[in-house]
Amino acid sequence: MREFFETWWSLEPLAQLLVPITLLCVRLPKRPHYVLRSMAVLAVLLGIAVVPLATGVVTGLDTMQAFVVFSVLLAVFVLLVLFVYDVRPWTAIFCATAGYTLQNIASGLEILIQLVVTHSASAQLDGAWEAVVSIGVPTVVYAAGYWLLVRRVNVKGLLEVENRMMLSMLVVVVIVVIGFDVIIKALVFKGIPFNLLVLLRLVHPMVCVFVLIAEYELLYAKHADIERAETERLLAERERQYRLSRENIEAINIKCHDIKHQIRHLAQSGAVVDGAVLADIEREVNVYDSVVETGNEALDTILTEKSLACSNRGIVLTVMAEGSALDFMAPADIYSLFGNALDNSIEAVRDLPDPERRAITLSVQRRGAMVGVSVENYCPDLPHFSADGLPITTKVDGMNHGFGVRSMRQIAERYGGTLHAGVQDGVFYLNVLLARPQA
């Protein structure tokens, strides 16, 4: 195998690069004819690696040529990611540069182990050890990279990369990662002291790790900005809805109260009006006059609004709430927390064929220095949960949904509490603990 790679030495780095870049891209949305495109990519890479050597155009690379070739190869991988996956250029740059950096960590550690074991800058490891190191080190590095970094980045975060700083990371990888590696290899031919060579080979993977962390920080920073902006927008919208709902409910209640008096007056005046018709009208009006009173104005508003929505859909909403226990919360936060929770429950049960299962239970209770909020509803389909324990939206357009649950968790954490969701015996439950401020 070593003789094969010594003859076709350009295949080894290409194979090592393909693995980590593919790991980073594997969950990305694929373009049409993905298999054909992937085969075309492999053919292009094989041509890049084999044709120059087979035709004798290239027999070896000096320092500058190696730097240019590997820099161009990085740009080629960016284009190939764009060709196979339906992503933006910034996402392609991230995947290519992060994969390139992982590969440099693996190859740098391979050389470092070789130096330490052989105590020579040019000696090769024995056959068995060479196979173990050349296969084992990349496997460990790529597995660690996937476990520690890749799997923690959700697809939505990758697809939303718009940070122009990714372009600067392309330059950083070219200069720092590729350039540093090429310079070290050039110094070997200049007769650099062995101890200094080992030190440089130790520093190079550390620099690569720093670059990789910087890339992920850029990714997370942008993703956090997007989520924060979306959450703030939702909170502002909820606050506006709260004000409008409060005004609308008050106006409806006043009007319905007047109508009830008018109906009662007509019934008592002896006018020729069908009593059954008046009873039906009053029964309908009573639906809109059923104000929920818990002792907290904001909670009363959202519960009244949602009780009307439930009544219209044949859903039974059972409320056991000490509204005064939430007096420490801002009205907009109450409206957002309970609005999101009840909206999700209503959506889950509204289409259930069994009327007895179209039910939602909500409770708010003091628990010592905490306040417990619980929402339960029947769950026909088991939801999927993300790595952070939050239910994943079932909407087709998942890119623009799923912020409601994260908004609820942020509200809980803002008040020193926690949010937990799960399913037990076919019932979905959402439990929120909030810390009451000490007097």
Image: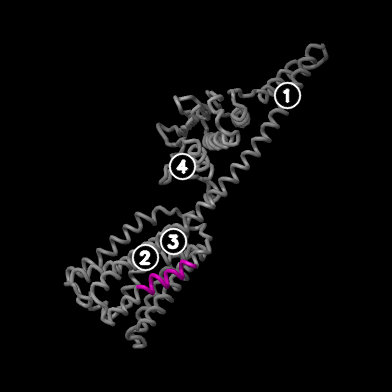
Categorize mark 4 by other alpha carbons within 10 Å: few (<14), some (14-19), many (20+).
Answer: some
3 and 4 marks in contact (CB < 8 Å): no
| Colour pattern | one colour
Asked whether residue 91 is drawn in magenta, I would say no
Which residues are the magenta region? 168-180
3 and 1 marks in contact (CB < 8 Å): no
The vertical placement of 420 against 186, above or below, is above
The residue pinned by badge 4 equals 391
The vertical placement of 164 against 231, above or below, is below
The residue pinned by badge 3 equals 215
User: Residue at horizontal 43%, vertical 60%?
Assistant: 214
Q: Earlier in the sequence, mark 3 or mark 4?
A: 3
Circle nearer the viewer, 2 or 4: 2
Q: Earlier in the sequence, mark 3 or mark 1?
A: 3
- Where is residue 178? Give x, y as percent: 38, 73
Q: CA distance from mark 1 to mark 4?
A: 40 Å
The residue pinned by badge 1 equals 256
